[in-house]
Amino acid sequence: MKDLLLEEFRARFGRTPSVIARAPGRIEFIGNHTDYNGGTVLGASIDRDVWVGVAPRDDGQWRLATAAKDGVVTLPAGSGPARQSGEGSWVNYPLGVIAAFPEFGLRPPAGFDFLAVSDLPVGAGLSSSAALELASALAFLASSGQAAPRETVVRLCRHAENNFVGVPCGILDQGVSGFGQRNHLVFIDCRGPVFATVPLPAEARFWIFNTQTKHALVDGLYAVRHRECMEAAARLGVPVLADVTPTALGAAEAKLPPMVFRRSKHVVEEIARVDATVAALCTGDLAAVGRLLTASHRSSQHLFENSTPELDFLVDRLTAAPQVHGARLTGGGFGGAVMALTTAEFGDAQAAAVVAAYAGRFGHRPEVLHAQTGDGAAMAD
Ligand code: GLA
């Protein structure tokens, strides 16, 4: 990917970048919609990244390009960048990062040429946007001679997503891209937030099936779920749903409209499943981990209602295979991808059978990614 970045940078800007950073996509392992509810979550950074190269300019211009699109977006350098729309709206991720710099006591970069390249599928629920934010933030810091603790970078990127891009996401995506480690899962207690890693048993394998479908209202639906959870916490008289145990929620059922109760039940039981998953990982019991993953999906399907027939179909087919420990939708839901945790015996033949069954039912093929864990965001040499 680095060679591709250098080549594209030369093609667009006629020179080489002075700094290069990369940041990985992530799998949401378990902990669905728990992050902004103050709960816990487990994620894995994967071996697919967004790479960003930056070279300073001295004419007061920001020039941004991505290998995925033709052209260059040119803007005047300054501390209050304007949100872009249409074809160039992808620049809102790096611009949002710049807009957040002063909020975290950092100097926005002066003029630059910027290029992003990626081998991470967009719109698959693998957080290509968080990866672009993290890689941009590291490159801007290095190119402007500044440094910041990793936790600040992660929080700054989430701030960009919440305030500039306008998605009320939690800390999961940026936290996992920032704190990921090969052969480990990232555990986040989102209330702090506090970041830790949990070793992943060596025999664990991941397969990702991207439906390449996306609900037209996906961002709006995410915001609706966010609002429903906040309403539930307010009705229960707590700051966040993580303050409620499954037993206490059961006792308070009468205080909540049925739909809000179902949303809350998903969140508080999901937090309990995250803790149970950490315990099962510590004893290397991948079969138990798999059962928790599939239970998480069923809860999304029936209680949180952020699944789709395509995602349910994949989970049903995958969990019927003896080599699959468990499977679930990964990320916000309403489309995107399913992740399966498998034994090493699950291979191309098994994946092809799932793809064929899916294509027979829905008339298009899901994209298959045999991704593995990878290291978190870093500067490239
Ligand atoms: C998206 C958000 C995350 C998290 C998940 C659902 O990926 O960006 O913050 O809320 O959905 O768990």
Image (tube, rainbow, N blue to C red):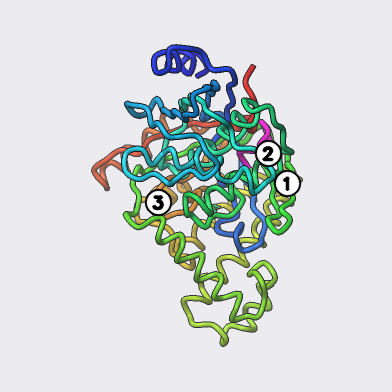
* Residue at 55% from the left image edge and 44% from the top image edge: 99
Figure check: 13 above or below 297: above
Query: Within the image, what quadrant is residue 154 found in?
Result: top right
Structural distance between the alpha carbons of marks 1 and 2: 7 Å
Give the secondary structure at mark 2: helix
Q: How many marks?
A: 3
Q: Is residue 253 left or right of residue 65?
A: right
Can you say which quadrant of the picture contains the C terminus? Answer: top right
Give the secondary structure at mark 3: helix
**Extreme residue toward the left, this view:** 363
- Viewer-proximal residue among 81 and 206: 81
Give the magenta part as a residue range: 176-184
Label 3, ligand 1: CB separation under 8 Å: no
Q: Are marks 3 and 2 in contact (CB under 8 Å)?
A: no
* Residue at 67% from the left image edge and 46% from the top image edge: 104
Amino acid type assigned to the residue bearing label 1 in the image: Phe
Circle 1 residue? 195
Graded by Cα atoms within 10 Å as few (under 14), some (14 to 19) or many (20 or more), the crowding at tag 2 reads many
Q: Are marks 1 and 2 in contact (CB under 8 Å)?
A: yes
Circle 3 residue? 311
Label 1, ligand 1: CB separation under 8 Å: no
Amino acid type assigned to the residue bearing label 3 in the image: Leu
Amino acid type assigned to the residue bearing label 2 in the image: Phe
Magenta stretch contains residue 40: no
Query: Within the image, what quadrant is residue 216 found in?
Result: bottom left
> Residue 259: image x %, image y %?
46, 76
Q: Is residue 127 visible?
A: no
